[in-house]
Image (cartoon, rainbow, N blue to C red):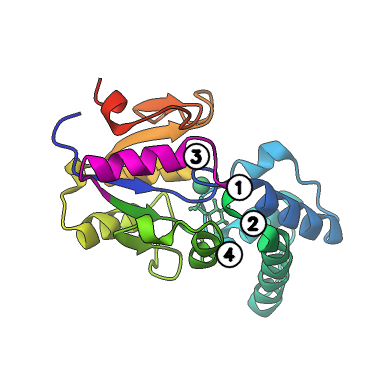
Amino acid sequence: MHNIKAVIFDLDGVLVDTAKYHYLAWKRLAQELNIQFSLQDNERLKGVSRMRSLDIILEIGNITLDSDTKIQLAQKKNIWYVDYISNLTPKDILPGVIGFLESLKVDSIKIALGSASKNSMLILDKLNLTNYFDAIIDGTKVSKAKPDPEVFLKGAEALKVLPSECIVFEDAEAGVEAAINAGMYCIGIGSKNILKMAHLVLAGFSDMTFDKLKL
Ligand code: B16
Ligand code: MG
């Protein structure tokens, strides 16, 4: 890794474990629709948009619905999800994240968010993380979902850096693919078996600093 000027973070599953609340809300909806929905199926939902997530669940259940019904179901899931995350506090930030963000500041590395979630601002606010970010690109600012690279390219553009000068942290297969498609160095957070395309996979940020990454 040479000449890294910026780090772009995914949100759900990287900075905070909201992925479990997405799963709980989708599982509840799937149950209402009589669709069997497993944790393994849930991997396909990580990083992809709300509507695409619903489409995947309907595909699993072999159900076709009109678009008004789908909008209502997606809204319903979101109401449950927002309710689940209503009690988030800075204590829910994943271990090592604050230390790593601080180390980026010390090294004058720019910081962006690159998340598919339309709830990003709400979550960053609850976690008291908003002020760390020089740019925030979320689900309200993109038209193409991961694995399309749009979210990360917009992040680099907002930070005025080249894609090759960025590191992306991602926990989802679709997100890793998006980062690679953007021409960025991608560090997966999670399991090597799932995040096969990432340049490097780490279990989390514990005790990590930007300096250690350069080794
Ligand atoms: P919302 P990320 C993604 O966030 C989640 O991983 C994905 O499961 C979710 O469907 C998507 O946000 C949309 O979220 O329904 O809140 O708009 O991982 O890209 O930060
Ligand atoms: Mg994620």
Discs 4/3, front: 3
- The N terminus, quarter of image: top left
Mark identifier at residue 106 = none
Mark identifier at residue 51 = 4
User: What type is the residue that disc 3 sits on?
Assistant: Asp
Residue 209: say if magenta. no
Q: In the structure shown, which secondary structural element does the residue marked by tag 2 occupy?
A: loop
> Pointer 4 and pointer 3: residues touching (CB < 8 Å)?
no
Mark 4–mark 2 Cα distance, whole angstroms, equals 24 Å
User: What type is the residue that disc 2 sits on?
Assistant: Leu
Identify the residue shown where x is 35% and y is 43%: 102
> Pointer 1 and pointer 2: residues touching (CB < 8 Å)?
yes
Mark 4–mark 1 Cα distance, whole angstroms, equals 26 Å
Total marks shown come to 4
Decide which of tag 4 and tag 2 comes sooner along the chain. Answer: 4
- The C terminus, quarter of image: top left
Residue, disc 2: 88
Discs 3/2, front: 2
Segment colored magenta:
92-110
Mark 3–mark 2 Cα distance, whole angstroms, equals 20 Å
Place of residue 77 in the rendered image (x, y in percent of width and height, measured from the top left): 71, 65
Q: Is residue 167 above or below residue 190?
A: below
Residue, disc 1: 92
Discs 3/1, front: 1
Task: Answer yes or no: disc 3 within 8 Å of ligand 2.
Answer: yes
Q: In the structure shown, which secondary structural element does the residue marked by tag 1 occupy?
A: helix
Residue, disc 3: 171
> Pointer 3 and pointer 2: residues touching (CB < 8 Å)?
no
